[in-house]
Image (cartoon, grey):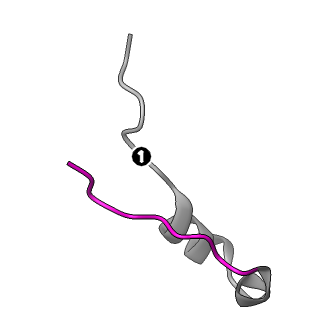
Amino acid sequence: MFDRTYYATHPDMMACVSNEELRDRYLISGLFREG
C-alpha cells in the first residue's frame, strides 16, 4: 500500500544537508493524480 514511510527529523540533524538530500528525503511524487 505505501512505498515509503516518513519520520520526523530533528532540526540538528538537518543543519548541513544539501538541497538534493532534502529533495531525496522529503519529496513526495505521485501524491495527486490529474483531474
Report the quarter where the C terminus lies: top left
Image point (39%, 64%), residue name: 5
Return the residue nearer the eye: 1 or 21.
1
Q: Which is more toward the observer, 8 or 27?
A: 8
- Residue 15: x percent and y percent? 79, 86
Q: Name the side, left or right, on which 34 lies relative to 23.
A: left
Foreground residue among 14 and 9: 9
Left-right relation of 7 to 34:
right
Task: Give the residues in magenta.
Answer: 1-10
Name the side, left or right, on which 22 lies relative to 10: left
Q: Which type of secondary structure does the marked residue at label 1 adopt?
A: loop
Is 8 a magenta residue?
yes
Q: Residues within 10 Å of mark 1 (few under 14, many from 20)?
A: few
| Figure check: 11 above or below 35 | below
> What type of secondary structure mainly makes up the magenta span?
loop
Name the amino acid, label 1.
Answer: Ser
Q: Would you place residue 13 above or below residue 28 in this image?
A: below
Residue 4 shown left or right of residue 29 in the figure: left
Q: What's the residue at 49%, 69% (across, down)? A: 24
How far across and down, in percent of the image, does residue 31 sit?
41, 37
When the figure is inspected, residue 22 is found, relative to residue 34, above or below; the finding is below
Q: Is residue 14 above or below residue 2?
A: below
**Residue at image coords 46%, 50%:** 28
Residue at numbered disc 1: 29
Horizontal and vertical percent for residue 27? 51, 56
- Magenta run includes residue 25: no
Give residue 29's position: percent from left, percent from top: 42, 46
Residue at point 47% right, 65% down?
A: 6
